[in-house]
Image (tube, rainbow, N blue to C red):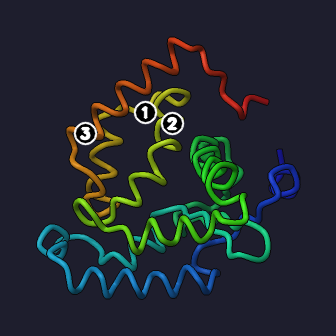
Amino acid sequence: MTKQEFEKQYNVHLIPKAESRLMRAFGVFMLVVWAVTFMWLWRRDRKNLRDAFIDDYWTTYRLPFGVTKITYPKMVPDPMDDQQRDIREHELLHHIHQLEPWWGPLTAGLLVIVVPLPIIFSGRWYLERRPYLHNIVYHRYDIQSVVDSLWSGYMIPWPKGMMLSWFKKKEQEMIRDKVPNPFND
């Protein structure tokens, strides 16, 4: 599938994250967050959050007007490469289930920015758990690795033990119920 076919089929635009003004602005916000939180203690030898956000992470967003945008990091030369399929599917789950309704962008924004309890950004846990569950079930991601990634990459969104339990339970339910991959070609 070509980039143009993918964009047309799923009604999204794939753009480099560094070319998105909104993502660059959010990167500056992440730099401020990084500077004023205790995360600097854990990341002294790593990139600051702004650089990591732009260079390492895919992000899907939709403003209340316009088409959904899937931004990909600098380290990805071709977002349509087969090695990126699992990540494209992950990001499409955000688009299809979370951003597509008219209230989706508002809800996602509130969950990421305004709902910081019980730990730091628990709204991220709500937004990320279903796409990561998809990766666990259909792309054989290791549950502990996903939990560790969420813990460190998403600023401690939920207690590790609770995330681990949720993923194990939901993975077994999906296997038991033989839930098909919605992206099989």
> Which residue is tagged 2?
135
**Label 1: which secondary element:** loop
Q: Amino acid at mark 2?
A: Asn
Is 45 left, or right, of 115 in this rendering?
left
Is 121 left, or right, of 35 in this rendering?
right
Do the residues bearing badges 2 and 3 touch, measured as CB atoms within 8 Å?
A: no
Quadrant (top left/top right/bottom left/bottom right) for the N terminus: top right
Q: Amino acid at mark 1?
A: Tyr
Of circles 2 and 3, the one toward us is 3
> Which residue is tagged 1?
141
- Residue under the image location 20 percent in, 38 percent down: 161
Closer to the chain start, of discs 2 and 3, is: 2
Front position in the image: 182 or 31: 182
> Total number of numbered labels?
3
Q: x%, y% of residue 150?
A: 33, 51
- Neighbour class for label 1 at 10 Å: few (<14), some, many (≥20)? some
Q: CA distance from mark 2 to mark 1?
A: 6 Å
> Which residue is tagged 3?
162
Q: Amino acid at mark 3?
A: Met
Is 5 left, or right, of 33 in this rendering?
right
* Picture layout, residue 22 above or below residue 114: below
